[in-house]
Image (spheres, rainbow, N blue to C red):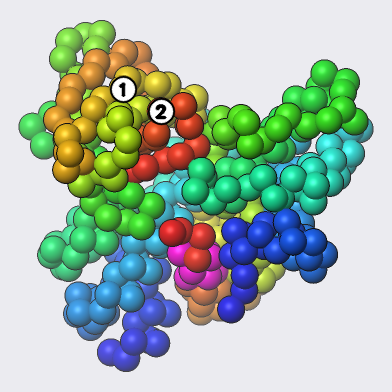
Amino acid sequence: MAATDVQLLQAIAAGSEPAFEELRKRYAGAVERACRRVARSEREDCAQEVFARVWRKAELFDPGRGSAAAWLLTLARRTAANFRRGRGGSPPVELAAHPPAVSPPDVDGFWLDAGLARLPERERKVIELAYYDDLSESAIAARLQVPLGSVKSWKRRGLNRLSTYLGMELP
Amino acid sequence: MKHEQAWKLLPDLLEDLADADLLAHVRACPDCQRQLFLLGRVDRMLRDRASTQRPSRRPRRSSPHGLLLTTAVAIGTVAAVAALVVGSRSGAHTMMLRTASGRAVGQAVMAYSDARNVSLALTARGLPVKSGQVYVLWAGDSTRLPMQVGRFMVDRTGGCRVRFNLPATHKWKRFWVTAPGNPSAVVAST
């Protein structure tokens, strides 16, 4: 079974590079979205800085104070704020002293981005078309030129997979 | 119906497509009830995200309330499903308050008290009792901007019964409870 986000952060704190790569793979898209308020040219640098700080600061993460997604989102927002102020390279705020100031809906959206990114492409695509584009399953089948049964199956699997990921992150 | 087959079909409950065999299995299967609870949360996250991405578009075809009603009726007292119910009664809007593990710890009931105010009655029992026994109630509206509603105390059993007023100019969609001084330490949420 795949490691949870909490387990990955704890492994990163212990110096595990594979854990770091896995966390980066999961949250790369979500972090880039969180950096969207900085100038386009700096967005990539901001996301890289976020993960550099994850590597350096993972030991500060305390699962008793909030979820891994909340911690990552806070880190991303603070890094982006530093970029906006033109201090991208400055030392980050000490996370342990400042608990994340993010709301559950924000964290849900951030986690959702990461969860969707972990899905197989066809499952993610079907779910995005169903929810974000408001397409019926028949319309999705026509759009993707695949059988209706495949759309139903991919959507079920994708939703079940996302729910399983979510269940792993809950205490 | 075998468990593996039921598990695969659980997302159908989100679209009112479940058959009697599936519901009968879910009624007797704690694992499926838990997964159904998680599916409901994922469904809500996706709908919330969709509503922020296309705020001017019409609502989705199928209402989650249809699912929830059907499911709740079919499953009866299954607690995991009750977590998803957002119901209305006599003009009031009721939301279940749950911990991250899905345990029901109370409810928030909203009603218009006058043209400018929404009254919120928060009733809870079994909140985790911590030192000081004070919690902070937060509200989120459709613009996703959190607002601190106020602080409240719980008794030694983690119970409380408190009322707050909120401005009626917002569409309050969600409430959550945190520890004081730590907005990310969510104790329970609707």
Q: Principal SS element in the magenta part?
A: helix
- The quadrant of the rendering that contains the C terminus of chain B is top left
Callouts 1 and 2 close, C-beta under 8 Å: yes
Residue lying furthest bottom: B2
Q: Earlier in the sequence, mark 1 or mark 2?
A: 1
Write down the residue under mark 1: B151
- The quadrant of the rendering that contains the N terminus of chain B is bottom left
In the image: residue B84, left or right of residue A147: left
SS state under label 1: strand
In the image: residue A94, left or right of residue B177: right
Q: Taking B21 as reference, is B27 above or below it?
A: above
- Residue at 41 percent across and 28 percent down: it is B180
Q: Of A12 and A128, which appears nearest the observer?
A: A12
**Callout 1: 10 Å neighbours few (<14), some, many (20+)?**
some
Q: Which mark is residue B180?
A: 2
The three-letter amino acid code for the residue at tag 2 is Pro
The CA distance from mark 1 to mark 2 is: 8 Å
Q: Of A38 and A62, which appears nearest the observer?
A: A62
